[in-house]
Image: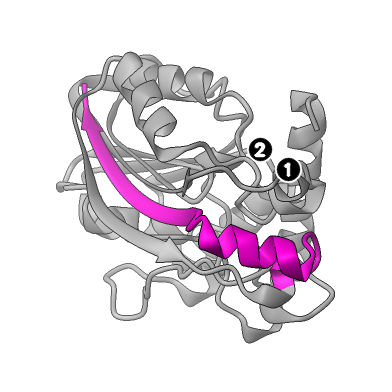
Amino acid sequence: MNNQEQIKSIVKEKYGSIARDNSQSCCGSEPSCYGPSTVEYSMIGDEYSGVDGYVPDADLGLGCGLPTEHAGIQAGDTVLDLGSGAGNDAFVARSLVGETGRVIGVDMTEDMIDLANKNNAKLGYENIDFRLGEIEDLPVSTESMDVVISNCVLNLVPDKVKTFAEIYRVMKSGGHFCISDIVLNGELPEQIKQSAEMYAGCVAGALQEVDYLQIIAESGFKNVKIKKRKMIEVPDNVLKEYLSAAEILELKKRDVGIVSITVVGYK
């Protein structure tokens, strides 16, 4: 799991399978995610129903927040959605930018891009563009974005320093990001951190919160603030896949936390 390309391959295959099956997984909210033979479980993705622009067909239940809620997107903005998946947050962002704005979604999984384009074809939006590409090397022009959003994706990217450097590069002066992501408070056991499946379960690639925020600051962003925070409870049946009963008890005593945060920062 030390090889970054191997990690990307695992994530790409997992999310490609989700797109092909068009089913919920990873950070989703399906009760079936709690099955005894799977590491997939609820990451308490925020409720989208009732949100303007919400497209149920584009919601695969993969989020851990609602970044558009705090993104301050205005009519006419150009918005970039990192790890856009089936288009869920991109379509919400499109409702905010209106006819005069533009939304670009980037995803490294071809099946997700295909699914997003199929969803968009049903809607007929001409100011949404879904592009195949990696977040660490964005297919986006320098200083072209007003707002960058992302929902439970950056924790899966191996090189977070390069990721935030790319976000800074593509953002206009005065622009900002709003990202929902998974971080850690305290060290997870090695069995969990090194698991390939947990990489596609939104946990193993997560950084300590303090390290995550430090990378953002060192990338040059200012006025970095956490707008929303939620603790995530990992069900015992998931932990049992990796830890003994004694190890689970010790983990809970140490109060190690998996946290969903929605953070903003400005250029």
> CA–CA distance between discs 2 and 1?
27 Å
In the image, is 109 to the left or to the right of 78? Answer: right
The residue closer to the viewer here, 22 or 186, is 186
Query: Residue 226: percent from the left, percent from the top?
Result: 24, 45
- Amino acid type of the residue tagged 1 in the rendering: Glu
Q: Nearer the viewer, residue 32 or 72?
A: 32
Q: SS for tag 1?
A: helix
Tally the marks. 2
Q: In this view, does 104 lie to the left or right of 71?
A: right
Q: Does the magenta-highlighted stretch encompass residue 244?
A: yes
Residue 98 in sight from this viewpoint: no
Q: Nearer the viewer, mark 2 or mark 1?
A: 1
Q: Quadrant of the C terminus?
A: top left
The type of residue carrying mark 2 is Met
At label 1, counting other C-alpha atoms closer than 10 Å, the crowd grade (few under 14, some 14-19, many 20 or more) is: few
Q: In which quarter of the image is residue 146?
A: top left
Magenta-drawn stretch contains 21: no
The numbered dot on residue 190 is: 1
| Residue pictured at 34% horizontal, 15% vertical | 218
Quarter occupied by residue 41: bottom right
Q: Which residue is painted at 51% across and 39% down in the image? A: 154
Quadrant of the drawing holding the N terminus? top right
Q: Is mark 2 on a helix, strand or loop?
A: loop
Nearer-N-terminus badge (2/1): 2
Magenta-drawn segment: 238-267
Q: Please name whichever residue, 56 or 136, is drawn nearer the observer in this view of the structure.
A: 136
Q: Dot 2 corresponds to which residue?
A: 108
Q: Is residue 54 above or below residue 17?
A: below
Q: In this view, does 10 lie above or below 22?
A: above
Q: Residue furthest bottom?
A: 31
